Amino acid sequence: MHIAPNIGTLSVLKTTNMIISTDILQQFDVPGPRYTSYPTADRFVEAFGETQYVQALQERTLSPRSVSTPLSLYVHLPFCASLCYYCACNKIITGNYQRALDYLDDLERELELLLPHLGEAQTVSQVHLGGGTPTFYKDKELQRLMRLLQTAFHWQPGGEFAVEVDPRTVDDERLDSLWSMGFNRVSLGVQDFDPQVQQAVNRVQTFESIDGLIQKARRTGFGSINLDLIYGLPLQTLASWKQTLESVLALRPDRLAMYGYAHLPARFKPQRHIAIESLPTGKDKTGMLAMALQLLQAAGYVYIGMDHFALPDDSLSVAKRQGRLHRNFQGYSTRPDGDLIGLGVSAIGSMGAAYVQNARTLDEYSDMLQHGRLPVVKGLSLTRDDLARRSIIMALMCQGRVEMRDIEQSYLLDFNAYFARELMQLKSFVTQGMVNMDAQAIEVTRTGWYLVRAIAMVFDKYAQADGQRAHFSKIL
């Protein structure tokens, strides 16, 4: 076990060759996008519908990337057996299994409508089943879904095929079944190990059960086993969070995703079960982040960026070292930024210079399919300005460096003139030691990497507009 810093005096986070104060963390704890895309999903418009999506699909079939660049595939399975009070996902709480069976029929219809425009046997290098709770489904139904996907697409050997798992729905036998279906990665939702915190968010599970599943997953052959954690939950304290982190370090997962809880009960009804007075103070929440950064890196984890950590030999850490890190709607990725097909209710995809989102309600999603229509309700065709800014933001978020000449050549612009306002704004980050700039490049420093979202936001023309940030969660 690694010992946490003294909780009462935790005012400065120290890592190798780096110091960042909690005062700076608090200064930048402001609302902002996560940049799984740019422009962000709140900018999608209803004028982009099925016709525009079909055009984007057909453009791919005619382009070289149809052969040279494998697809990524995300399938949203929204059903859960019980409600987690912190949850901000698009989910459906139900005890009626028939609804879940009917939904598989809808997914099959969506594939049948999609494939004629995309082409048969397109190669996929990434598949991710998210939710909701994918393991709400029984093995028989998951096997049916996987057969559909494996028939519709060619799965690239050595690809990443992941499923999100609620540990309360999985045992050793089910892990064997998931492996036999073709999954080679699992992500376990843990959030916190403290019993009181678990009760407060209505998600009770033991350390022993998680430990057993991780050990079984390793023996079976799953790679890059991920745990999800949340800091800032009700009844969490610095002391209880330290114990959770020490428990996580004892498990030593390959990857960790650690999110700050965003209390937005006006938008997410489940959060109305959480009393605001039970939440940690902003100062304590920042202290939890600082503590996690300290303990995880002292234990050998590489800070990938934002909320992701990985062991040094994990493919995510290797990709960061080699400058091959990418970012998509699932977060950081080792695979090149290519086209993403989103299947299911509320799923988001990207195709060329376009984003697309399916209907958010099950009734609307199913009704559109029943009438023979792809269930697209909004999206966005990116402008030249959007594409240039996307390239800059993703370079900052993934490589921590923007080569100005590359942007100038790709988008036929004068970087210093076109982004004069943004370069002026970056000077405050330079002063605080978070960014280095010269005539050739913008580079995020090791200190700045902890606040890379705030740095990237400088180039987001929508987030810079007055009144455009309030609906985002806070950066930390």
Image: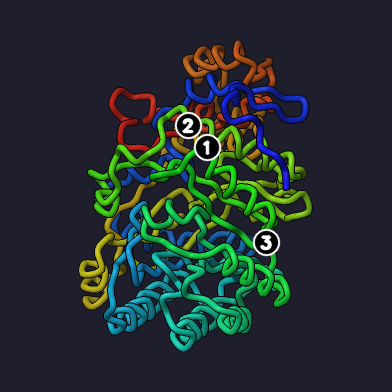
Query: In the picture provided, is 42 more to the left or to the right than 197?
Result: left
Horizontal and vertical percent position of residue 28: 48, 24
Disc 2 and disc 1 in contact, CB within 8 angstroms: yes
Residue occupied by mark 2: 284
Disc 1 and disc 3 in contact, CB within 8 angstroms: no
Of 190 and 440, nearer the camera is 190
Residue occupied by mark 3: 224
Query: Given the image, on which type of amino acid does mark 3 rest?
Result: Ser
Of 79 and 110, nearer the camera is 79
Can you see residue 358? yes
Crowding around mark 3 (Cα neighbors within 10 Å: few <14, some 14 to 19, many 20+) is many
Q: CA distance from mark 2 to mark 1?
A: 7 Å
Query: Given the image, on which type of amino acid does mark 1 rest?
Result: Leu
Crowding around mark 1 (Cα neighbors within 10 Å: few <14, some 14 to 19, many 20+) is many
Query: In the picture provided, is 416 more to the left or to the right than 267?
Result: right
The residue mark sitting in front, 3 or 2, is 2
Where residue 212 is drawn, which disc sits there?
none
Rendered image quadrant of residue 215: bottom right
Task: Please say if 137 is above or below 235.
Answer: below
| Secondary structure beneath label 3 | loop
Horizontal and vertical percent position of residue 443: 66, 25
The residue mark sitting in front, 1 or 3, is 1
Residue at image location 36% in from the left, 74% down from the top: 110
Q: CA distance from mark 3 to mark 2?
A: 30 Å
Q: Earlier in the sequence, mark 1 or mark 3?
A: 3
Residue occupied by mark 1: 238
Query: Given the image, on which type of amino acid does mark 2 rest?
Result: Asp
Residue at image location 60% in from the left, 35% down from the top: 291
Of 180 and 152, nearer the camera is 180
| Secondary structure beneath label 2 | helix
State how the image is colored: rainbow
